[in-house]
Image (spheres, coloured by chain):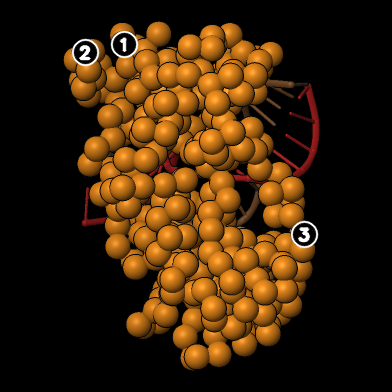
Chain colours: A orange, B brown, C red
Amino acid sequence: MPELPEVETIARDLAPKITGRTIVGVDVRWRRSVDERGLAARSLVGDTVVGVRRLGKYVTFDLASGRTATVHLRMTGRLIADPPAKLPHTRIVMRFEDGGSLVLSDVRKFGRLRIIEGDPRAALAIGIDPFDPALTPARLHELMHGRRTKIKVWLLDQRRLAGIGNIYASEALFDARIRPTRQAGKLTLSHASALLRSLRKVMRKAIYHRGSSIDDYVDAEGKPGEFQKKLAVYGRGGLPCRRCQATIRRAVLAQRGTFFCPVCQL
DNA sequence: ATCAGCACCTGTTGGC
DNA sequence: TGCCAACAGGTGCTGA
């Protein structure tokens, strides 16, 4: 479910609520919700959260010990601070010394908590952030160089750019008028420039609207986002293109629904 | 390097 | 009405 804008919204909401709090216990209600590549959940006990950020699609909690607790929500995960009542599908409860808690709730059980020692970016193997000022059109063009994979599929690969998911890949490519099936390595510098501009534009707007809620995404307050009302192509298969009135097509790329306008995306 | 297929899970929706 | 397949904001593994 959540992509960069949704994760950014959650991290921003959680930062003032969780920063400074000390963990006194972690209840794991579904074993596999803790990533076994990281440290055990109980190693968090006694540690204090000193900051909350987003890394790609991960919500990350910087700890006083220097370690990092990362949460990936995958499709249906939610992070709720100090839930007023018992939440359904609770998988992990992080309890704080003040009696409050942070809950990972997830219907489909795909979400993961991973506790990392050392550099989290390296451990998570994620690429550059689309909003990183170091990501210039030239740098993006260079990253795509020689890649024969389709641009839509390339955008979903978190080892290159980190944070783009299925909705915003379709949206940004529509905005940049680039067909999702174009080979990444064949795009020009000016394509890269347009694409980068579109990625930032679309996701900045989505963050402003607190993300897209198509099925069940909610922010850390438990409220849905508003950006789904503004989506230009995602989920609009068979409907007229908002730019040229041609019929929006749905294709399947890398087993994911992909939406584009066959007329104005070249 | 790249890709298809499947695995992980549950819930909702749309077709017959 | 009811059953069942298809599908869902993601990632990760296997085998070709």
x and y percentages locating residue A53 in the rendered image: 53, 58
Neighbor class of circle 2 (other Cα within 10 Å; few <14, some 14-19, many 20+) is: few
Which numbered dot is residue A244? Answer: 2
Mark 2, secondary structure of its residue: loop
Q: Is residue A103 left or right of residue A32?
A: left
Do circles 2 and 3 both sit on a common chain? yes
* Dot 1 amino acid type: Cys
Q: Is residue A26 left or right of residue A239?
A: right
Estimate the spatial distance between the alpha carbons at disc 2 and disc 3, rounded to whole Å.
50 Å
Chain letter of mark 3 equals A
Residue A9 in the image: above or below residue A168: below
Image quadrant for the C terminus of chain A?
A: top left
Q: Disc 3 marks which residue? A: A118
Q: Nearer the viewer, mark 3 or mark 1?
A: 3
Which numbered dot is residue A25? Answer: none
**In this orientation, does residue A184 appear?**
yes
Q: Disc 1 marks which residue? A: A264
Mark 3, secondary structure of its residue: loop
The first of marks 3 and 1 along the sequence is 3
**In this orientation, does residue A110 appear?**
no
Residue drawn at x 54%, y 81% as measured from the top left? A21
The first of marks 2 and 3 along the sequence is 3
